């Protein structure tokens, strides 16, 4: 194989065993946002929301303490988004209309949602809240929505890197990857072999786009629902509320 250039094309189903595919993504995102924001008309006592959130996903909110206020602010935009067939369609519509604020809000939401889906909060969808069905009800009402709901990483990425990496834990020089997906499954699959952070995995894999790089060997056509590491070495979803993100 070393005498040839090889390009792997990863489509929307490449993360199926962890990340919902397009026909269930809207419902899964709705489950996510409704889990943390009280339903209309539901009265939440002072301090109760914090207790629910900490019980629901303690580690996740330690990592991303800034996300709750954003979710509350974003909710109306989110419900506009799920009126469309896909969030990609909605993003394209916002781009064509020049609505940069809502487009950046949508990107921030997707970054938060994918970070949660790929977090190691094993019970993240399991506890019953006043405005969310418990898992038994979810399973009964929509089996597809709950499919692979606790899988952090699609196992096929582990197989993929086991077959590709050389003894220096690098991709061979003749191998390139083009991915349609903006999740972090590629980076997480690689991290299983290296223990690098997501950011370091993107550097090692030469992911594009990232930072100011103008090329790469792993091309993510839709960018990354990304996080970055600040000077405090803590993970953040975005650096300022009004800044552009890619």
Image: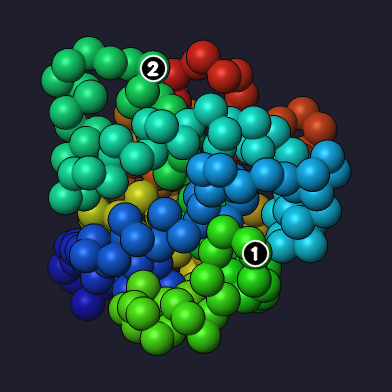
Is there any visible trace of residue 44 in the rendered image? yes
Camera-side residue of 94 and 83: 83
User: Where is residue 141, by image quadrant?
Assistant: bottom left
Is there any visible trace of residue 157 in the rendered image? no
Q: Is residue 56 left or right of residue 22?
A: right
Q: Residue at x 35, y 61 (%)?
A: 27
Q: Is residue 101 above or below residue 142?
A: above
Camera-side residue of 181 and 56: 56
Residue 230 position in % (x across, y down): 71, 31
Quarter of the image for the C terminus: give it: top left
Residue 214 position in % (x across, y down): 33, 29
Q: Is residue 220 above or below residue 136?
A: above
Residue annotated with mark 1: 129
Please report whichever mark, 2 or 1, sits nearer to the chain's N-terminal start: 2
Q: Residue at x 42, y 54 (%)?
A: 30
Marks 2,1: beta carbons within 8 A? no
Q: Which mark is residue 192?
A: none
Q: Residue at x 57, y 19 (%)?
A: 241
Residue 65 position in % (x across, y down): 74, 39
């Amino acid at each position: 194989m070393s005498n040839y250039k090889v390009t792997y094309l990863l489509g929307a189903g490449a993360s199926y065993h962890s990340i919902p595919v397009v026909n269930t993504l809207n419902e899964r995102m709705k489950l996510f946002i409704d889990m943390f924001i009280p339903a209309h008309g539901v009265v939440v006592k002072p301090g109760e929301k914090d207790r629910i959130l900490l019980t629901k996903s303690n580690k996740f909110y330690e990592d991303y303490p800034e996300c709750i206020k954003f979710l509350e602010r974003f909710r109306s935009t989110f419900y506009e988004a799920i009126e469309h067939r896909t969030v990609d369609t909605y993003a394209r519509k916002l781009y064509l209309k020049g609505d940069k604020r809502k487009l950046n809000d949508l990107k921030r939401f997707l970054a938060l949602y994918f970070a949660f889906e790929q977090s190691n909060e094993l019970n993240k969808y399991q506890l019953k809240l006043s405005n969310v069905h418990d898992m038994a009800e979810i399973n009964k009402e929509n089996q597809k929505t709950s499919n692979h709901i606790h899988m952090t990483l699609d196992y096929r990425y582990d197989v993929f890197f086991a077959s590709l990496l050389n003894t220096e834990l690098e991709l061979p020089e003749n191998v390139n990857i083009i991915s349609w997906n903006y999740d972090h499954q590629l980076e997480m699959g690689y991290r299983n072999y290296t223990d690098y952070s997501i950011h370091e995995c993107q550097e090692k894999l030469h992911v594009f786009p990232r930072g100011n790089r103008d090329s790469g060997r792993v091309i993510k056509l839709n960018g990354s629902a990304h996080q970055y590491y600040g000077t405090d070495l803590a993970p953040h979803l975005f650096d300022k509320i009004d800044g552009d993100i890619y």
